Structures are given as C-alpha cells and as structure tokens.
Image: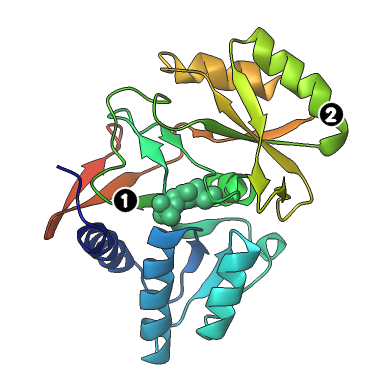
Amino acid sequence: MEKVLAAIEKEKQLAASAAVAYIQDGQVIGLGTGSTANYAIREIGRLVQQGLQIRAIATSRKTQVLAESLHIPLIDSNGVDYIDLTIDGADEFNEDMVLIKGGGGALLREKIVASMTKKQIIIADSGKKVEQLGLNFKVPIEIIPFAGNYVINRLKEMGGIPSIRQLAGKTFVTDQGNWILDTDFGHIKDPRSLSQHLDEVVGLVCHGLFIDLTSQIIQGIDNSTQTIFRRSN
Ligand code: 5RP
C-alpha cells in the first residue's frame, strides 16, 4: 500500500535529524538540495541559532536562499580545499550505493560538492531504495544548450530516450544556465560503464549517476531510521 504523504515527510525528517547529529563544531558543511535536504537545513538553522559554529556551502540557489533565511553562514566553494560533511538527498539508490540525483535540477553543484566532501551522508525516505536502478526514474543529464542536438543524438546511440526538461511550459534552465535531458535508459545494469560513456560526451556537463561518492545512506523507515554504510568504510 502507498504510504500517505505525512508518513513520508516524517521519514525524511527522521533521516535528516539523524544525519545532522554527525555535524561537529568548526566543520564546513555541504548543504544539499530538495525536500529531504531542506529538513536537514532547517535543523542546522536551529542548531546555529543555539550556537553551533559551522560554515556551509549551498548546492543550489534555492538552498542558498533557505540557508540565508536561517542565518546559516555561507561561504564560497572556492574558499576551501575540502568539505567535511555533506548532507543531501537522492532520487533513487541501489544496494551498491549508486545514486540517481538531479530531480531538483541541482546535480552539477551537488556532484562538485560531493567530490569535495570527505563524508557524504544521503538522506531519504523509505521509497528511494530500488532493486533496479533507472526503471522508475530517468537519469538527469545537464548539458550546454549549444550542444543540445548533438548530445541528444549521442544519448540515443547509447540506447537512451532523452527529453528536454520543461517547467511551467518552458525549458527548465539550471542555476548554471544549462538544460537538463531526463533520459530513460530502462534498467541500468552497469551504472559504472554508463557513467564512463556519458562522461566522454562533449557538451554533456554532468549526469545524475553518483558512484563512489557516498559514505552512508540514512533512510527513514516508518518511525525509525536505517543506515547503510559504504563497504570500504
Ligand atoms: C536535487 C536532488 C535531490 O536530492 C533529489 O531530487 C531528491 O529530492 P527530494 O528530497 O525532494 O526527494 O538530486 O537535484
């Protein structure tokens, strides 16, 4: 039976609180994007009001606006060499901790922040873990608009079915001024190989497959949380 919305929101909140508990004074924190990450950002805002000393880097304009409204001190990504801890959401993940991200359109900054991060915690409700990656969620692919037709043709050659993301009847434009191709690859059996092929396409800036970037995933499940750790940890 489908979970009611309130139960899903509760799971997001529980996962967010569990992740925020890892934050320590003095750390540089990556702030993710999306409804689950927003719970973490609000919780961090409360802790900052109570005296928590952190500096944060936002993964999107929307996250920046929320963090500023909560008086979370933000810094430029170029001002640090690494980020201690990032808390972000995901659209899908499998048991190997391969993620699909970018449903909110922030995948490029999210991947840069994840790459700069020592410990990335993904927070999710119980619906995000899947047996077969890509069946229910298309892979968001950020592209330079100039390369639109070229990249679309390359993705089709790889077996993908790309569609240019629309929002309110217009082409969706990312924070970087790019477009997103939501691309249906069906069940992605070999995400590593697909990721490598995508990375070779000129004009393709970033794809939503996140591999080897996550340290742990905290999932809200009903009234508790379950944590999956990276095997090498
Ligand atoms: C944004 C993302 C989000 O993390 C992802 O879309 C999950 O969002 P939500 O927590 O709202 O389900 O990748 O680009």
Left or right, 225 with respect to 88, comes to left
- Rendered view: 137 above or below 152: below
Q: Residues within 10 Å of mark 1 (few under 14, many from 20)?
A: many
Whether the residues at callouts 2 and 1 have beta carbons within 8 Å, the answer is no
Q: Mark 1 belongs to which amino acid? A: Ala
Q: Position of residue 233 (x, y in %)?
A: 29, 39
Q: Residue furthest left?
A: 223
Q: CA distance from mark 2 to mark 1?
A: 33 Å
At 35% from the left and 76% from the top, the residue drawn is 43
- Is residue 1 or residue 72 the one in the foreground? 1
Nearer-N-terminus badge (2/1): 1
Q: Left or right of 208: which side holds 156?
A: right
Q: Check the image and report above or below for 213 versus 158.
A: below
Viewer can see residue 201: no
Is any atom of residue 150 visible in this view?
A: yes
Give the quadrant of residue 145: top right
Q: Amino acid at mark 2?
A: Ala
Residue at 42% across / 42% down in the picture?
91
> Left or right of 60: which side holds 186?
left
Q: Is mark 1 within 8 Å of ligand 1?
A: yes
Q: How many marks?
A: 2
> Is 232 left or right of 177, judged from the image as shown?
left
Q: Which mark is residue 229?
A: none
Q: Residue furthest right?
A: 146
Q: Nearer the viewer, residue 225 or 8?
A: 8
Q: Residue 231's x, y, as percent?
A: 27, 32
Q: Which mark is residue 147?
A: 2
**Which element carries disc 2, helix, strand or loop?**
helix
Label 1's element? strand
The picture places residue 96, in percent across and down from the top left corner, at: 32, 28
Q: Which residue is mark 1?
A: 124
